Amino acid sequence: MKLWDKGYATDSFVEEFTVGRDREMDLYLAEADVLGNMAHMRMLNSIGLISDKDRAALEKGLKKIYAAVRRGEFRIDEGVEDVHSQVEFMLTAECGDAGKRIHTGRSRNDQVMVDIKLFSRSALVALQQSVRALFDVLISKADEYKEVLMPGYTHMQVAMPSSFGMWLSAYAEALADDMLLLDAAYKLVNTNPLGSGAGYGSSVPLDRRMTTRLLGFDDLAYNSIYAQMQRGKTERTVLTAIAAVAATLGRLAQDVCLYSCANFGFVKLPDAFTTGSSIMPHKKNPDIFELIRAKCNRLQALPTEVTLIMTNLPSGYFRDMQLTKEIYIPAFKEIGDALRMAGEGIERMSIDRDILRDDKYKYLFTVEDVNDAVARGVPFRDAYREVGMRVQNGTYEHDGRELRHTHEGSIGNLCLDGIRAKFERHAFDYAPALKAEEELMK
């Protein structure tokens, strides 16, 4: 049975083709759908289209469904198209005609849009927490290893002295900047499309500000057509923010793969984060970080996938948009799992504290020697040439003195507190939305 049933049958293959993976993906939206139904039902009651008696019955039914979702017991029955249909059928079975009234002034178009918004809001908060967990590991390890030197590279050639603290805090600050994009995505998500119907509003005198308040949205998506045009735009914007995190994480994973190989040997991964070879007994492969790298590369492609699905669509709803769910919803788990694995790997890896004893790194300090000569009054270009000639003719030796880097962001002044403050500035507050959801389901 379908909500739009008009008494004729649909070809079974047509139905399979059009429904696709919707039932599977819609299970992730079930909690959001119940919240949206509760807010819409209370609003309909406030404008006199649902009686107080029906409101009481529907509240009881919705809370029952909500509890089943929370317990992991909610299912979409065979033959039911989507989560919206399943919830309405369950309410009708539980509450009789009251369940048939709940769709008044609404379309599945605004239902799915509000579900995506509510799901995204919660998923972005969980993602922020995962990013924070990795950020905290990176900052903690950067502080622990801030005095431990390592070579820095440009063009994959030995360049200048770096430190493990500088390396790790670089990725921490990258995550802090990625939080800016997550914050922007959250702000776009946290606007209310409910009441836009099929994209053209309703002759029913809906109170859209009431549902905005009940659901804890910051504001309305005002124009009904634009509220529907946010479908696809919302997913693309959020996936762009996820792709930014993935780009940072993938680059970190590449560094770990490189630095853990025997030719570098800067870090050693715990045995639990490596796998062996079926033929070479000595092998310990960094498969975890290789998979993080691959998954993050795939995540960076997703905004383009959604863009191409939506490209050249005119205003209004089209079934094309259904396909964005199967791209969008799984992305949150994939990036969350990758962040968790990276954090655990970085937390447990060990480092080589004596890397620079190797003679291959003796040219690492040539810039230090040039700067020392400049401090004694030698013009920079003359000092550069003199040190360069010693390198060229094989007479260069570094005297092993300590480094004296003091400016902000250098080896001796990593500004970890500043990086922490940047992260916190870009974090977003979910408390008002969470409070609204809790109040709605009391």
Image: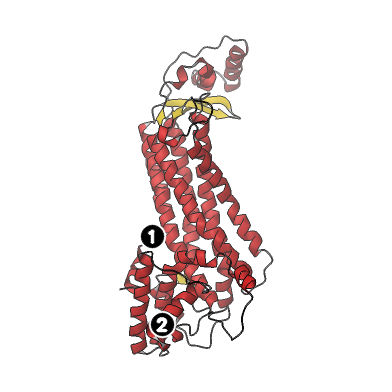
| Image mark for residue 429 | 1
Dot 2, crowdedness within 10 Å: few (<14), some or many (≥20)? Answer: some
Provide residue 382's location: percent of width, then percent of height. Answer: 60, 18
Q: Is residue 377 visible?
A: no
Decide which of 5, 386 is in the foreground and name it: 5
Disc on the earlier residue, 2 or 1:
2
| Tally of numbered discs | 2
Provide residue 20's location: percent of width, then percent of height. Answer: 58, 66
Dot 1, crowdedness within 10 Å: few (<14), some or many (≥20)? Answer: few
What is the C-alpha distance between the residues marked 2 and 1?
38 Å
Provide residue 195's location: percent of width, then percent of height. Answer: 50, 79
Q: Is residue 59 left or right of residue 119?
A: left
Q: Amino acid at mark 2?
A: Ala
Q: Amino acid at mark 1?
A: Asp
Which of label 2 and label 1 is nearer to you?
A: 2
Question: Label 2, on which residue?
Answer: 93
Provide residue 378's location: percent of width, then percent of height. Answer: 55, 18
Question: What secondary structure is marked by label 2?
Answer: helix
The C terminus appears in which quarter of the rendering?
A: bottom left
| Image mark for residue 226 | none
Residue 13 in the image: above or below residue 101: above
Question: What secondary structure is marked by label 1?
Answer: loop
Q: Residue at x 42, y 38 (%)?
A: 345
Q: Is residue 306 visible?
A: yes
Q: Residue at x 53, y 39 (%)?
A: 290
Give the image's coloring scheme.
Answer: secondary structure
